[in-house]
Amino acid sequence: MAKRTTVLKVTDLRRAFGPVTIIDKFSLEVRTGEAVALTGRNGAGKSTLLRCLVGADRPDDGTVTVCGNPMSETSPDIRRDVATVIDDLDFFPDLSVVEHLDLLARAHGIEDPDGLVDEVLHEVQLVPQSGQLPGTLSSGQRRRLALATAFVRPRKLLILDEPEQRLDTEGVAWLAERLKSERMKGLAIVFASHEPSLVATVATRTVELGAPRG
Amino acid sequence: MSSPDVTADDFDPAPEGPAQVPASARELKGLIKGWRRGRATKKLSEAFSDAYVALIGVAMIGAMVVNVIVKAQRVVAQCETASCLSARTLLPWAAFAGTVAVALAVSRLFGPVLASAAEGFWLLDAPVSRAKLLGARLWAAVLIALGGGALIGALVSALTGSPATEVAIWAAAGGLSAAAAVAFSATQQGIERHLLTRVATYLFTVVGLAALFAVVGVAAGWLDLGVSADLGVQLGVVVIGFAAAVLVISFVVARLRLRQIRRTRLLSGGALVSGISGAFFALDVGLARDIVVERRALELGHVHPVRGRGLGLSALTWREWQRLRRFPQPLIVLGAATVVPYACDALGLSTVTPVLAALTVFGATIPLLGGLRVLTRTGGLARCLPFTMSQIKLASVAVPAAVVAVWVLATVSAYIGFGDGATRRSYAEAFLVSLASGGAGLLASIRWTQAKGVDFGKPMVSTQAGAFPPGLVFNVFRGFDVCVLVTAPLLLGFSPLWSLALGFIVALLLFNSLDAESLKARQEEQQRLLDRQKADAAAARQRKR
């Protein structure tokens, strides 16, 4: 069995908005081949925590390291290692679906990206939409495209915020199997979810945030 | 397969009552007008008194425009040279064609007949004639075009020193033509065909550009059109007659076709207006442009995918090149911008040519920087790429910079000085001035493109006009400031090397602004890590004791 190394380490993280503390003294360690599911009611701080983990938001206190390096959203090393699917993904309005994936794969140095891009397009069932511009996609198709961006590039850590959102039943089942297979290959995964079947299939650990609804 | 518990026979129809008579369009409109009046919290006079800052601003700008016109009239009164006379005759033509092209393009983009989402839901679904509901909208669109076109026609004509009769003729020609363009566009909206509108837009754009090139050609002595000012006026009268005929016919046809416009087509224009007006309310012109770009992409819907080239950063640059090849329209605008330094020189405006040229390049290169805009407006896409922000910006800007370099080479001759009374420069100096002008324009558009919207979450600043979020007003001047700053040494008569040095400093700031922020964030993160390690070590020592 391969030795597990720490990919993500979060220590005493705190994030507050004015007088309201969303996350306090939150610590987490995720190693290769582990998948941590963040669960909890709406407003428990799952998305805020994930935004702090990917560097889109700055914590008030505490530290986040990825493969031993302090988290910095603009560091090329971090960007190379961490694939994220959170709600702030933007698209070029004049590039088609397949061109977005091709660009990402090439930017990450994948020499012959055609095979990989085709395979991922097939998986996310966007082959018929490959020539469409992002503005014409349905919300579910946009979600699939966002997920596809994480799979056409190298990655050591995958961070997803409610990846099941806007996916149909078949899509959630595919995602669960895909994430499980990624984890088995050694990828570290942190994801927030409200979908019990996804959590049950993928997660090796579950962390519940916030107080349960009283 | 399990059968459902409910069957088709399982229903109990309600008894039909007496036939209902639907309200008329007039009644519905009157009802809404009554509600709106009832909910008004201010009289019109009170609203005007609250908007005194805006009114004073309009009055000041109006006074400045009148002052400029009076001065221009005095200068052009001594107009005797070929270049000046050609400009006087041909510039109103260019303005006329440009106005019509803009009227056609804008009306095709918005409708021109449109309805808000609320009107679509509450009114357009009512069993009343859609033509009666929308008639006022068509009138409004045509009248706005009439006023706008007349204003532009009169202004350009007055600025070229034309007498009052000529100004009136060009005002009528501009106004009626713009109104006819909108009415014609409405006829096409009625049958949901836009090919003719699009062709007409390109046609008038070409005519406008041809008129501009003719100004330069005559000034440089390449052309001798022999057009007298009288002929221009006579043609203006012909244009008035033709435009009036097109306006009347198109308006009648458009009015008849109003009832068959689909609701989605009306609402998409309304949604676009509300989105853009929201963006303008926050003085976020970049967001307004994003909405228009998104809308165009939505209309197109599908493209033939092209395989990328290169690896790493070069893949980004190649993609920019492929995007430009796919949508080369911005090149037409930049090509037309080549005329500006020549036209300024022809008009004897050599001193202000660099700043006017920079402003033109600023406006013309913004559409080329779509990639930079997407990569900098939110962090999402840039986070997927394994490069620093500086590298991403440089890769995105490489293709637009190459295009601007071509513009610089094409405009060197204008700075050598060929018009009557123009400033004469050596080839080397002309090249440096052209480089400074083009560079200033490009840097200004980069600043404009990567500008962040106003943060309404921050504390407001108290002003005479009420509470403003910080940076709201300065947002409007972004880009213009770079143009003025970089070209200021040229206006003051210093060496162009000063402008290039200033441009270099601005470029350093623009390409490294986000990285400076991230560097600071990284330092803070490392400091926090260090503090934690120290605290852990201190705690361990404490435990040992």
Image (tube, coloured by chain):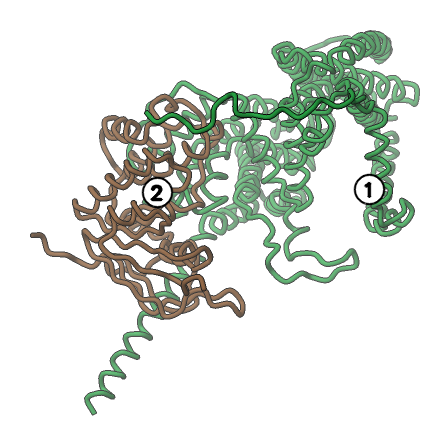
Chain colours: A brown, B green
Precedes in sequence: disc 2 or disc 1 = 1
Q: Farthest residue in the bottom direction?
A: B545
Depth check: give the residue in front, B336 or A92.
A92
Q: Please name the residue shown 49% across and 51% down the image.
A: B509
Instruction: Determine if marks 2 and 1 fall on one subunit.
Output: yes
Q: Which residue is drawn at 84% across and 13% down?
A: B229
Locate the C terminus of chain B by quadrant.
Answer: bottom left
**Left or right of B429 on screen, residue B57:** right
Q: Provide the residue designation for mark 2.
A: B385
Q: Nearer the viewer, residue B130 or B494?
A: B130
In the image, residue A150 above or below residue B310: below
- In the rendering, at what x and y percent does residue A37 appear? 30, 54
What amino acid is labelled 2 in the image? Leu
- Asked which secondary structure carries label 2, the reply is loop
Q: Which chain carries label 2?
A: B
Q: Looking at this view, is B540 or A184 the one in front? A: A184
In which image quadrant can residue B384 be found? top left
Q: Which numbered tag is attached to residue B61?
A: 1
Q: Mark on residue B170?
A: none
Residue B265 place in picture, x, y as percent: 64, 22
Q: Residue at x 55, y 44 (%)?
A: B447
Badge 2 vs badge 1, beta-carbon distance below 8 Å: no
Left or right: B172 with respect to B533? Answer: right
Instruction: Tell me the quarter of the image containing the N terminus of chain B.
Output: top left
In which quarter of the view is residue B215 placed? top right
Q: How many marks?
A: 2
